[in-house]
C-alpha cells in the first residue's frame, strides 16, 4: 500500500504548479487551467485522506468541488470568450480596466 | 347653561385663523383674509364674553384640563390645563376685546400694505399665544405663551423686513427678551425643585400651608421672575427693546407693545403674588425698579421727536407705575392701571396711527401741527387719550394712577420717596403728552404739501370705542375693582378706614400736578414757541444727554454687545470653530486622504498583481495557522 505521504506530496506539487502557473502565465486560458490544477491538487489530498480513514465524507466533498469546478468552467469560459470578442486579446496584462 | 365653558376655544379659534391665513392667505382674496381674521378675533372675544356672563355661577378657580397629561415623568406631571378666575377673565376681556378692535382698525390701516394676509396671520398667532399665556394654570404652559408672544412680537416688529432698522429692532427685541426668559426658566426650575409642582394653585396652596416660609429660596425665585417680567414688560435694565419695537406697524405697537403683551410681566407677578408676598427683598426690588423706570423713561419721553417713540417711552414709564404698584403689594391697583392703560394707550397709538396715516407716513412731530380742524375725530379721541394718560379727572388714568400713588405713599418707611418719584413722573407725563398734543394738532401744519385726510370708519370706530372706555374705564373705582379681583390678586382685607381726607388731598395734588404739566406745555409749545429752543441752548449738555436717551444703547453696545461680538468672532469663531473643531476635522480627513493615497496603489487593475496579493495573503494565513508546528519543526531540526 502506498503511504499517504506520497499522495500528499503529489497533491502539494500539483497545487504549487497551479499557483505558479496562476502567477506567471499571461494567457487567460492558461491561468484558468492553473486554477483547475489547484482544485484537483486539493481533490487528491481529500481522496487520499478519505481512503486512509476509511471515511466517505472526503469523497463527497470532492464531488462537490467537481460540480463547482464544472460550473465555473462553463461560466469562466463564457467570460473569456466575451473578453476575447471585445478586446481581441487574452493577455491578462492588457486587461486592466478595473482600476481607479 | 352647559357644564363646560370651552375655554380651549379661546386660543384655538385665533390659531385656526392663523393657520388659514398663514397657509392659504397668499392665494385668498383680500376680503376673505379680512373676514377670517376678524371672525377669529371676534369669536374668541365672544367665547370670553360667554365665560364672563357665566362667571357668577362658577366655583373658583374654574379649571379645564386635557385628560392626557402633557408631561408625565417620575414625580413631575404637567397638564394642558386652563384656569379661569377674575384676574384671568379681566386679562382675557382686555386681550380679546382690545384685540378685536385693533384687528378692525388694522383693516383700514394696513389696506395698502404688501403682505396684508401675513400681517393678519401674525396678529391671530399673537392672540393665540397671549390667551394661552393668560389662561395657563401652570408655569410651563404660561412659558409656552410667554415665548409665543415673543415670537409673534418679533415677527410683527420685523414686518417690514426689507427695512434694516425693522429687522434689527425685531432681533433686538427677541434677544433682550431671551435674557428675561432665562430668568423665568431659572425661576421655573427652582419652583419645581422646592414645590415639586409647576401648578400655580399647588404652589399657592403649599405656601398658604407653610406660613413660616420667608425669604431665602423664595427671594431667589421671585427675583428670577422679576428678571423675566422686566424683559417682557420693558423695565430697567431690559427696557431698551420697546422703543425700537416701534418699527413695527402702528396697530402692532398698540396691541402688543402697549396694551397686552408688555403687560404680561405685570400679570405674571400678580399671578405669582403668593411667592412675592413672602419676600420683602424682592418686593422692594420690584418697587424700586418700577419707580426708577417710570421716572427715567418719562424724562426721555420729554424730548423725542418721533410721535410713536414718545408713546413708547410713555408705555415704559406707565409699566414702571404698574411695577411700582406690584412692589408695594397693591396688586389690584397694578391690574387696575393695566386695564385703564390698555384702553388709553391703545387709543393713543391708534390715534397716532391715524395721524400718521393722514399725513401719508410722517412720524416726526416737528413736521406736524394744525391738524385739529382737518382730522376732528382723531383729534377728539386723541384728546381723550391724552387727558386719560395725564391723569386729569374724570378720565380713566386719574383713578388708576391715583390708586398707585396712594398705595406707594402708605408702603412703609420707603413710601414717601416712591410717592415723590411717582408724582414727579406724573408731572413729566402730563408735560410730554401735552407737548405731543400741541405739536400735532395746534399751530400751523409744518408740511404744507401733505394731503391731509380723515381716516376710514374702520379706523375711527375703534378710536371712538376706546375713547369712551378711556373716559369711563376708571369710574368703577379701585375698591369695587379690587373686590371683583378678590383673592386672585392677593386682596385680603377691607380698605383702611379714616384716610378719606388724605386720599382726597392726594388726588387734588395729583390733578394739580398734571395741570401744571399742561400749563407749562401750553406756555412752551403754544404761546411762546421760542422757549423750547431757548431751553435747549441753556442746558446743551443735559438736553443732548436726554435726547440721546442717556446713551444707554451705546453703553450696552460698548459694555456688552461689542465684547460679546469680539469674543464670538475671535474667541469662538476663530479659535474654537476654525481652530479646534475645524482642526480636528482637518486631521481626520487628512488621515483618511493619506491612507487612501497609499492603499489606492493596490488597486492597479492588473489581474496578476491581484493574484500575487491573494497568494501572499493565503501564505501568510497558512504561516499564522501553522506557526506553532513550524516552531516545533525548527526546534527538531536543531
Image: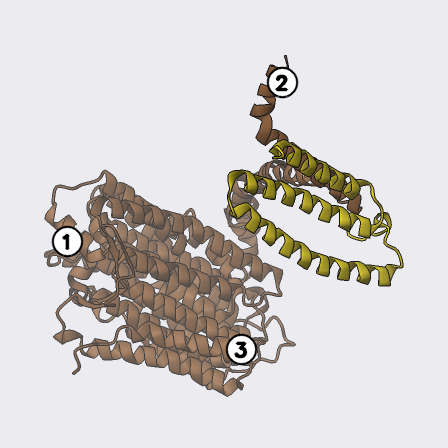
- The chain drawn brown is chain what? B
**Chain designation of label 3:** B
Report the disc number at residue B634: 2
Query: Which of the pair B458/B56 is nearer the observer?
Result: B56
Residue pushed farthest front?
A: A1
Q: Residues within 10 Å of mark 1 (few under 14, many from 20)?
A: few
Q: Residues within 10 Å of mark 2 (few under 14, many from 20)?
A: few
Mark 2 lies on a secondary structure that is helix
- Indicate left or right for B417 with B306 as reference: left
Q: Position of residue B173 (x, y in %)?
A: 48, 56
Residue linked to disc 1 = B205
Instruction: Give the CA separation, mark 3 to mark 2.
Output: 94 Å
Residue linked to disc 3 = B116
Residue in view at x 40 percent, y 59 percent: B147
Q: Nearer the viewer, mark 1 or mark 3?
A: 1
Mark 1 lies on a secondary structure that is helix
Amino acid at each position: 500500500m502506498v503511504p499517504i505521504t506520497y499522495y500528499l506530496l503529489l497533491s502539494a506539487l500539483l497545487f504549487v504548479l497551479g499557483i505558479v502557473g496562476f502567477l506567471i502565465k499571461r494567457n487567460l486560458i492558461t491561468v484558468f487551467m492553473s486554477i483547475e490544477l489547484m482544485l484537483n491538487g486539493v481533490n487528491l489530498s481529500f481522496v487520499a485522506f478519505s481512503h486512509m480513514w476509511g471515511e466517505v465524507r472526503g469523497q463527497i466533498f470532492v464531488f462537490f468541488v467537481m460540480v463547482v469546478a464544472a460550473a465555473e468552467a462553463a461560466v469562466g469560459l463564457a467570460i473569456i470568450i466575451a473578453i476575447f470578442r471585445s478586446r481581441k486579446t487574452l493577455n491578462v496584462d492588457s486587461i486592466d480596466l478595473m482600476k481607479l | 347653561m352647559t357644564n363646560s365653558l370651552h375655554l380651549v376655544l379661546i386660543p384655538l379659534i385665533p390659531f385656526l385663523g392663523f393657520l388659514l391665513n398663514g397657509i392659504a392667505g397668499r392665494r385668498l382674496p383680500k376680503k376673505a383674509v379680512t373676514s377670517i381674521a376678524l371672525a377669529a378675533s371676534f369669536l374668541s372675544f365672544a367665547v370670553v364674553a360667554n365665560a364672563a356672563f357665566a362667571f357668577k355661577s362658577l366655583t373658583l378657580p374654574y379649571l379645564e384640563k386635557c385628560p392626557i397629561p402633557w408631561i408625565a415623568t417620575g414625580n413631575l406631571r404637567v397638564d394642558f390645563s386652563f384656569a379661569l378666575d377674575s384676574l384671568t377673565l379681566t386679562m382675557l376681556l382686555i386681550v380679546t376685546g382690545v384685540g378685536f378692535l385693533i384687528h378692525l382698525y388694522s383693516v383700514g390701516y394696513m389696506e395698502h400694505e404688501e403682505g396684508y394676509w401675513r400681517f393678519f396671520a401674525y396678529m391671530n398667532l399673537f392672540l393665540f399665544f397671549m390667551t394661552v399665556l393668560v389662561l395657563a394654570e401652570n408655569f410651563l404652559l404660561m412659558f409656552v405663551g410667554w415665548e409665543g408672544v415673543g415670537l409673534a412680537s418679533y415677527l410683527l416688529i420685523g414686518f417690514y423686513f426689507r427695512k434694516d432698522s425693522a429687522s434689527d429692532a425685531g432681533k433686538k427685541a427677541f434677544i433682550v427678551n431671551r435674557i428675561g426668559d432665562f430668568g423665568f426658566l431659572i425661576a421655573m426650575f427652582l419652583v419645581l425643585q422646592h414645590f415639586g409642582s409647576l401648578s400655580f394653585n399647588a404652589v399657592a396652596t403649599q405656601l398658604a400651608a407653610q406660613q413660616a416660609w420667608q425669604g431665602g429660596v423664595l427671594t431667589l425665585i421671585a427675583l428670577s421672575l422679576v428678571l423675566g417680567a422686566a424683559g417682557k414688560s420693558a423695565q430697567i435694565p431690559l427696557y431698551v427693546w420697546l422703543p425700537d419695537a416701534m418699527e413695527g406697524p402702528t396697530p402692532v405697537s398698540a396691541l402688543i407693545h402697549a396694551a397686552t403683551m408688555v403687560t404680561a410681566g405685570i400679570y405674571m407677578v400678580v399671578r405669582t403674588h403668593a411667592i412675592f408676598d413672602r419676600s420683602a427683598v424682592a418686593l422692594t426690588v420690584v418697587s424700586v425698579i418700577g419707580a426708577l423706570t417710570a421716572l427715567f423713561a418719562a424724562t426721555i419721553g420729554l424730548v423725542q421727536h418721533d410721535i410713536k417713540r414718545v408713546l413708547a417711552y410713555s408705555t415704559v414709564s406707565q409699566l414702571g407705575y404698574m411695577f411700582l404698584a406690584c412692589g408695594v403689594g397693591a396688586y389690584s391697583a397694578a391690574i387696575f392701571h393695566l386695564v385703564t392703560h390698555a384702553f388709553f394707550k391703545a387709543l393713543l397709538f391708534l390715534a397716532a396711527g391715524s395721524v400718521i396715516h393722514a399725513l401719508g407716513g410722517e412720524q416726526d412731530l416737528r413736521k406736524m401741527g394744525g391738524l385739529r380742524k382737518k382730522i376732528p375725530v382723531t383729534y377728539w379721541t386723541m384728546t381723550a387719550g391724552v387727558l386719560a394718560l395725564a391723569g386729569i379727572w374724570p378720565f380713566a388714568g386719574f383713578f388708576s394712577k391715583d390708586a398707585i400713588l396712594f398705595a406707594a405713599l402708605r408702603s412703609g418707611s420707603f413710601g414717601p420717596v416712591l410717592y415723590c418719584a411717582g408724582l414727579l413722573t406724573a408731572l413729566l407725563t402730563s408735560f410730554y403728552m401735552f407737548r405731543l398734543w400741541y405739536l400735532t394738532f395746534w399751530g400751523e401744519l409744518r408740511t404744507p404739501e401733505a394731503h391731509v385726510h380723515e381716516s376710514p370708519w374702520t379706523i375711527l370706530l375703534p378710536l371712538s370705542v376706546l375713547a369712551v372706555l378711556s373716559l369711563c374705564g376708571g369710574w368703577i373705582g379701585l375698591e369695587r375693582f379690587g373686590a371683583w379681583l378678590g383673592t386672585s390678586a392677593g386682596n385680603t382685607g377691607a380698605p383702611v378706614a379714616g384716610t378719606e381726607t388724605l386720599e382726597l388731598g392726594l388726588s387734588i395734588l395729583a390733578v394739580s400736578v398734571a395741570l401744571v404739566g399742561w400749563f407749562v406745555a401750553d406756555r412752551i409749545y403754544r404761546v411762546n414757541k421760542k422757549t423750547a429752543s431757548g431751553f435747549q441752548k441753556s442746558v446743551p449738555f443735559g438736553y443732548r444727554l436726554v435726547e440721546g436717551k442717556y446713551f444707554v444703547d451705546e453703553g450696552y453696545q460698548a459694555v456688552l454687545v461689542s465684547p460679546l461680538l469680539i469674543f464670538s468672532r475671535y474667541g469662538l469663531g476663530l479659535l474654537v470653530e476654525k481652530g479646534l473643531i475645524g482642526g480636528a476635522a482637518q486631521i481626520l480627513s487628512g488621515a483618511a486622504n493619506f491612507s487612501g493615497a497609499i492603499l489606492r496603489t493596490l488597486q492597479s487593475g492588473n489581474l496578476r498583481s491581484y493574484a500575487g496579493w491573494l497568494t501572499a495573503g493565503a501564505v501568510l494565513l497558512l504561516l499564522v495557522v501553522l506557526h506553532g508546528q513550524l516552531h516545533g519543526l525548527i526546534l527538531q531540526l536543531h
